[in-house]
């Protein structure tokens, strides 16, 4: 006898999102333990941790009405993942970024700002993949990304990401809040974000280390 977990497409999507959230929390817990035990390098840990945090933020925002408390979600599904909850909910940045920010809080090339930029890039790209293409959904994400890029002193004024985000924000400002990007516009924006992200990572002083 087949047992259905959902009654309609919306319920199915909700349970799929639950499964993704569960997987992100579990993966973060394993990553934190691997880092503490020196099983992976700091650079590998930071790259993967930033991705998980960014994916978590996008998903948590999508599920904010059905999952108001991540801690309660973890309790409900009997997830013993204290390190993941601390990293995803309490801290919001990788341990390596916390350590660097504490060591050089006043540095212009603050690691915390770098992490913020990476998260804003990934959040914007993830949102487009989730078909969040209304102007009032896209505009705030690009504004946050633009603001974080402008805070990073190592990037020149004509940096690709800065100029492209400025162009997109200007274009979106001329549209109505409820207007949506066409499929072609969304695809171009995703391409511009990906291209700018790659340029951003290449511009970092410690890129590749």
Image (cartoon, rainbow, N blue to C red):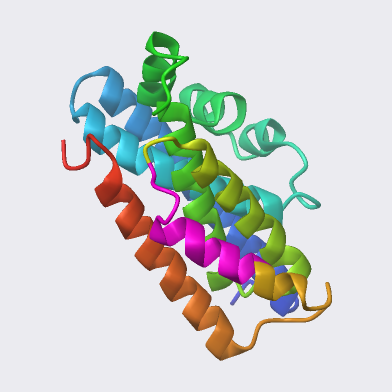
Q: Residue 14 lies in what quarter of the image?
A: bottom right
Which of 190 and 159 lies nearest the eye of the viewer? 159
Instruction: Please state the total of marks drawn on the protein image.
Output: 0
Residue drawn 39% across and 13% down? Answer: 104
Can the viewer see residue 122 in this picture?
yes
- Report x, y in % for residue 191: 42, 74
Q: Residue furthest front?
A: 157
- Name the quadrant of the C terminus: top left
- Name the quadrant of the N terminus: bottom right
Question: In the visual, does 107 lie left or right of 16?
Answer: left
- Report x, y in % for residue 136: 78, 66
Which of 101 and 12 lies nearest the eye of the viewer? 101
Residue drawn 35% across and 51% down? Answer: 200
Instruction: Inspect the magenta stretch and tell me whether residue 74 lies in it.
Output: no
- Report x, y in % for residue 146: 57, 52
Above or below 181: residue 75 = above
Residue drawn 81% across and 52% down? Answer: 65
Q: Residue 18 lies in what quarter of the image?
A: bottom right
In the image, the segment drawn in magenta is 155-169
**Of helix, strand and loop, which mostly describes the magenta segment?**
helix
């Amino acid at each position: 006898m087949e047992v259905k977990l959902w009654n309609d497409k919306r319920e199915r999507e909700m349970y799929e999102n639950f499964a993704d959230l569960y997987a992100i929390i579990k993966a973060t817990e394993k990553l934190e333990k691997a880092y503490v035990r020196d099983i992976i390098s700091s650079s590998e840990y930071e790259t993967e941790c930033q991705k998980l945090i960014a994916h978590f933020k996008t998903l948590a925002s999508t599920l904010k009405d059905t999952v108001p408390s991540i801690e309660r979600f973890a309790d409900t599904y009997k997830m013993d993942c204290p390190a993941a909850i601390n990293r995803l909910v309490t801290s919001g940045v990788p341990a390596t970024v916390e350590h660097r920010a504490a060591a050089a809080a006043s540095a212009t090339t603050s690691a915390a700002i770098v992490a913020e930029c990476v998260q804003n890039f990934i959040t914007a790209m993830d949102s487009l993949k989730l078909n969040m293409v209304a102007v009032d959904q896209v505009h705030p994400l690009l504004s946050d990304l633009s603001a974080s890029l402008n805070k990073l002193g190592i990037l020149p004024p004509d940096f690709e990401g800065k100029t492209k985000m400025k162009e997109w924000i200007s274009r979106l400002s001329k549209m109505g809040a409820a207007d949506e990007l066409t499929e072609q516009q969304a695809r171009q924006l995703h391409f511009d974000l990906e291209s700018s992200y790659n340029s951003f990572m290449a511009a970092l002083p410690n890129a590749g280390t």
